[in-house]
Image: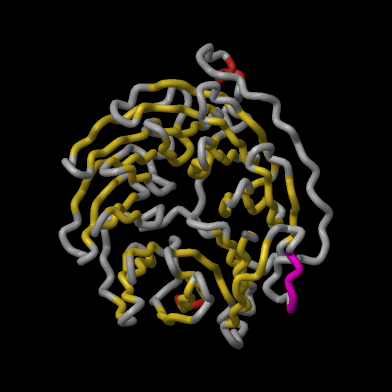
């Protein structure tokens, strides 16, 4: 069973979309110049870090030791209270996210296909078409569980179960014991982004098909909605204030009621919407395939506040600051209110970066195994 590593989306001319009378036309995007390249201030190879002007401080450094040419660092992830650093051949190093202290090392039969998922002391790894549970306290690796379909997203935690979303559109619940998997629903398209769980409701979108709401408490479908023809959904979902937000391939951002799925509004953005929208306060951060990052105010006016070109991935958010990874592999800090670029740093090409979803911390590692955690100043 093959796993799709990247999503494709057809670029449909926007002329058709502009004919939709119900859309809200956003403000004109403000393009901003990229800062000139130079030595990276964020590189973990640096001996000192002078980041006061950037509003950052070094939280901790860590060295994995001598990595040989065939054991180069592959990636870095934040999973709950742990930072997981992946070397070649399935070798995973788990560090304490607060202190950088080494906790444990585990070797899997192959590399990770998705970011790890944390639940208490347990980590769940997607390797090939299987899921492994790893107890970081006892350092015990469980037997693999094959859900019967390829996972295109990391498992999502719901109480003592995992929500599994598949490339064939399947949604299932898996108890942490690894047995008794329960099928929930099926969508007619791959699910590329993690579903969102709000209370006992699960919301998920399938590329090209529909967005669905599922009641996990009573195991029943609440509603499902499709986009206005000829469009197709192209993003994950976000939930805020009684609304579900999802984007399509024409560049429309839709809002549906969480309870009944009634459409409430839609706004036309500058390009097809990708990734999973993120809510920060009363603002919604949306990625497009230009690439760019767009900020939408979720108040009564539903105003597009700003657009920042070049953003490929949202890393984390802080006190009025948004941190992004750009298509040129630079890291930038933006003002949440205005979208103004506060600073930009040319991250070395051999560096991998992960943001902490729960606090404004960046974890950066290079291929030689040097790692640093950088936190926003108080």
Q: How many marks?
A: 0
Q: Is residue 64 above or below residue 269?
A: below
Dividing the picture into quadrants, the one containing residue 82 is bottom left
Query: Which quadrant does the C terminus fall into?
Result: bottom right
Residue 355, horizontal then vertical, whole percent: 55, 59
The foreground one among 266 and 358 is 358
Asked if residue 144 is among those painted magenta in the image, a careful observer would answer: no
Q: For this view, does 236 lie left or right of residue 121?
A: right
| Residue in view at x 33 percent, y 31 percent | 258
Percent x, y of residue 129: 34, 62
- Most extreme residue toward the front is 378
Residue shown at 23%/39% (left/top)? 215
Q: How far from the left and from the top, in percent, is residue 249?
A: 52, 32
Looking at the picture, how far across and down is residue 291, in whole percent?
Answer: 64, 42
Q: Which residues are magenta?
A: 47-51
Taking 183 as reference, is 339 above or below it? above
- Residue at 29% of width from left, 43% of height from top? 199
Q: Is residue 49 magenta?
A: yes
The color scheme shown is secondary structure
User: In which quadrant will I find the N terminus?
Assistant: bottom left
User: Would residue 296 be found to the left or right of residue 327 on screen?
Assistant: left
- Left or right: residue 108 versus residue 291 is left
Classify residue 374 by image quadrant. Answer: bottom right
What secondary structure prevails in the magenta region? Answer: loop
């Amino acid at each position: 069973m093959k796993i799709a590593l990247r999503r494709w989306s057809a670029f449909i001319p926007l002329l058709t979309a502009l004919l939709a009378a119900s859309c809200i036309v956003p403000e004109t995007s403000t393009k901003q110049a990229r800062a000139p390249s130079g030595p990276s201030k964020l590189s973990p190879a640096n001996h000192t870090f002078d980041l006061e002007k950037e509003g950052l401080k070094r939280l901790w450094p860590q060295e994995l030791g001598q990595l040989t040419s065939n054991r180069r660092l592959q990636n870095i992830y934040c999973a709950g209270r742990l930072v997981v650093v992946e070397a070649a051949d399935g070798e995973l190093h788990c560090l304490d996210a607060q202190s950088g202290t080494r906790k444990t090392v585990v070797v899997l039969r192959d590399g990770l296909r998705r970011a790890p998922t944390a639940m208490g002391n347990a980590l769940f790894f997607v390797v090939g078409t299987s899921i492994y549970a790893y107890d970081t306290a006892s350092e015990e690796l469980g037997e693999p569980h094959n859900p019967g379909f390829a996972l295109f997203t990391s498992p999502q935690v719901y109480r003592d179960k995992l929500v599994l979303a598949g490339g064939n559109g399947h949604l299932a619940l898996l108890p942490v014991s690894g047995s008794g998997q329960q099928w929930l629903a099926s969508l007619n398209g791959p699910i590329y982004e993690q579903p969102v769980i709000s209370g006992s409701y699960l919301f998920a979108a399938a590329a090209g098909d529909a967005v669905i709401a599922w009641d996990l408490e009573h195991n029943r479908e609440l509603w499902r909605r499709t986009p206005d023809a000829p469009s197709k959904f192209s993003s994950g979902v976000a939930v805020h204030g009684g609304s579900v937000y999802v984007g399509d391939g024409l560049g429309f951002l839709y809002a549906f009621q969480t309870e009944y799925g009634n459409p409430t509004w839609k706004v036309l953005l500058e390009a097809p919407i990708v990734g999973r929208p993120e809510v920060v306060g009363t603002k919604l951060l949306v990625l497009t395939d230009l690439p760019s990052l767009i900020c939408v105010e979720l108040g009564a006016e539903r105003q597009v506040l700003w657009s920042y070109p070049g953003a490929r991935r949202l890393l984390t958010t802080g006190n009025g600051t948004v941190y992004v990874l750009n298509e040129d592999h630079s890291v930038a800090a933006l003002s949440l209110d205005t979208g103004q670029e506060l600073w930009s740093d040319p991250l070395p090409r051999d560096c991998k970066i992960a943001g902490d979803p729960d606090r404004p911390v960046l974890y950066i590692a290079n291929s030689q195994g040097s790692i640093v955690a950088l936190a926003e100043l108080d």
